[in-house]
Image (cartoon, rainbow, N blue to C red):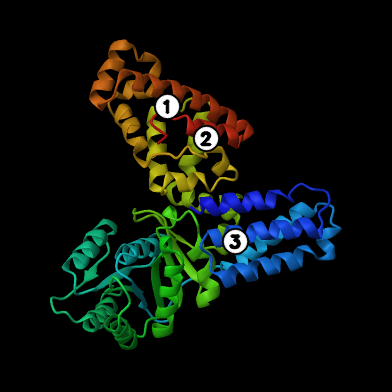
């Protein structure tokens, strides 16, 4: 995510970072590099111009030029400006004083709108203890209704739909149904088109007028860059939405839409989606995103994701096992499964400060864990608890059962033993670099 931009910004800032003294000349040179990096990232020209102007003005101030560590001061200025153009503060969705809270979702076809509806329902249910109901108001594509129902089944959330092609009626009746069932949230999926047209705009406007939603969110594909910004602007002029959702952020190496949209449209980014999994949705925090863009990681978000999957009591028990050198392959398999539930593994790694550098050109395949789990599943409980019993014939049997080669079993056992030592050491010393090296060297773990 934003790899190209991060690399160029880091390179630009590096020219003044660590210097005991900086001048107006090298500030100007650095600012030019930053502007070039922003424009290469498809950031709106006016946004990039204003950004670099503010950075230059603040960097040339007396406080920076005479500071003990002006390089660090300069980096702080760039961070502050990044956070500001991304929105400044987290903007949450509004909640009704009297339930249900009605959330209207709009966007172009192919933006990930229907999937986002299910992701949002899961997020609100799991993190906010909400009881949502989904309205299938994309009535023109039977596949859209089927998709919504399939996704809703996975998270155990009800969907309301009718056979008639009447999206306004679907929306109104869903709200009434939610009230009668004492459900506190309604999320309305609307029809999209391949491009903006009058009919679609009028339909969304009619639904909005009929149900008077507490929150209207516009979903846009972040990978379309300035096209996303232009579409967001046009939608906002017509339906005056409350916030933006950026999808496919995991595939966006530039970041033009994310860095431009708030300043151009003057509406906050409220959620970002990274990947197809229903758990791959996150509230948008401008400060955390600014840190990630500058290669500082995002430890807070990583901890929050971990807390969703890890029980504190079990975590303490696991810590004791690690210290006593009792961590076994059963535990290892369980941790792999928890990590996969947390979201895209490459995104998780990049939340760790310095990890993007350590793992550069070492992308981890999402399917990499499957053969590892298959090997562990092919073992007996005794073998998982004590890999020392794995002689040649046992390893051959396990390899055959997992559909891999014997050397793959050997590699896993070898790496597992190294990881055990590393984890025991980390539990005492907390060395992140060792953790990164262990993750990078996992068998099957590289593309």
In the picture of the structure, the residue carrying the numbered disc 1 is: 328
Report x, y in % for residue 23: 82, 57
Residue at x 16%, y 79% (from the top left corner): 165
Q: CA distance from mark 1 to mark 2?
A: 12 Å
Residue at x 47%, y 25% (from the top left corner): 326
Report x, y in % for residue 180: 25, 79
Depth check, mark 1 against mark 3: the one in front is 3
Report x, y in % for residue 97: 43, 81
In the rendered image, the vertical position of residue 198 relative to residue 254, given as above or below: below
Helix, strand or loop under label 3: helix
Residue 193 numbered mark, or none: none
In-image side of 373 versus 260 (left or right): left
Q: CA distance from mark 1 to mark 3?
A: 39 Å
In the picture of the structure, the residue carrying the numbered disc 2 is: 319
Residue 136 occupies quadrant: bottom left
Residue 206 occupies quadrant: bottom left
The C terminus, quarter of image: top left
- Of the two numbered discs 1 and 2 on the same chain, state the one appearing first in sequence: 2
In the picture of the structure, the residue carrying the numbered disc 3 is: 287
- Of the two numbered discs 2 and 3 on the same chain, state the one appearing first in sequence: 3
Determine crowd level at label 2: few under 14, some 14-19, many 20+ residues with C-alpha closer than 10 A. Answer: some
Q: Residue furthest top?
A: 392
């Amino acid at each position: 995510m934003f790899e190209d931009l991060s690399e160029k910004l880091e390179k630009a800032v590096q020219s003044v970072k660590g210097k005991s003294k900086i001048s107006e000349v090298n500030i100007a040179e650095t600012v030019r590099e930053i502007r070039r990096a922003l424009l290469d990232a498809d950031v709106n020209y006016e946004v990039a111009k204003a950004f670099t102007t503010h950075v230059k003005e603040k960097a040339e101030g007396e406080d920076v030029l005479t500071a003990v560590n002006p390089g660090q001061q300069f980096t702080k200025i760039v961070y502050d400006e990044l956070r500001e153009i991304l929105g400044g503060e987290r903007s949450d969705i509004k909640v009704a004083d009297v339930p249900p809270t009605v959330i209207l979702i709009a966007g172009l076809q192919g933006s990930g709108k229907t999937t986002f509806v299910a992701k949002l329902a899961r997020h609100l249910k799991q993190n906010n203890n909400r009881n949502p109901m989904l309205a299938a108001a994309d009535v023109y594509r039977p596949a859209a209704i089927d998709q919504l129902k399939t996704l809703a089944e996975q998270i155990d959330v009800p969907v309301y739909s009718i056979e008639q092609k009447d999206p306004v009626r679907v929306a109104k009746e869903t709200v009434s149904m939610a009230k009668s069932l004492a459900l506190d949230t309604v999320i309305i999926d609307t029809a999209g088109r391949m491009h903006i047209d009058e009919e679609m705009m009028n339909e969304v406007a009619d639904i909005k007028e009929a149900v008077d939603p507490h929150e209207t969110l516009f979903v846009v594909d972040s990978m379309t860059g300035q096209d996303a910004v232009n579409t967001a602007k046009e939608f906002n002029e017509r339906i005056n939405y409350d916030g933006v959702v950026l999808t496919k952020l995991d595939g966006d190496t530039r970041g033009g839409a994310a860095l431009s949209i708030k300043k151009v449209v003057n509406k906050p980014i409220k959620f970002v989606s990274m990947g197809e999994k229903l758990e791959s949705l996150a509230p948008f925090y401008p400060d955390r995103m600014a840190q990630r863009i500058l290669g500082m990681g995002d430890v807070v978000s990583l901890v929050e994701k971990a807390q969703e999957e890890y029980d504190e009591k079990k975590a303490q028990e696991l810590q004791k096992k690690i210290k006593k050198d009792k961590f076994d392959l059963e535990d290892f398999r369980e941790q792999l499964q928890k990590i996969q539930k947390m979201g895209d593994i490459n995104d998780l790694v990049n939340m760790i400060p310095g990890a993007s550098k350590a793992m550069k050109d070492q992308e981890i395949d999402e399917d990499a864990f499957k053969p590892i789990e298959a090997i562990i599943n092919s073992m007996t409980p005794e073998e998982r608890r004590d890999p020392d019993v794995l002689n040649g014939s046992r390893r051959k049997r396990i390899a055959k059962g997992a559909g891999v080669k014997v050397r793959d079993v050997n590699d896993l056992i070898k790496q597992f033993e190294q990881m055990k030592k590393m984890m025991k050491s980390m539990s005492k010393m907390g060395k992140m670099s060792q953790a990164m090296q262990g993750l990078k060297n996992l068998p099957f773990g590289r593309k």
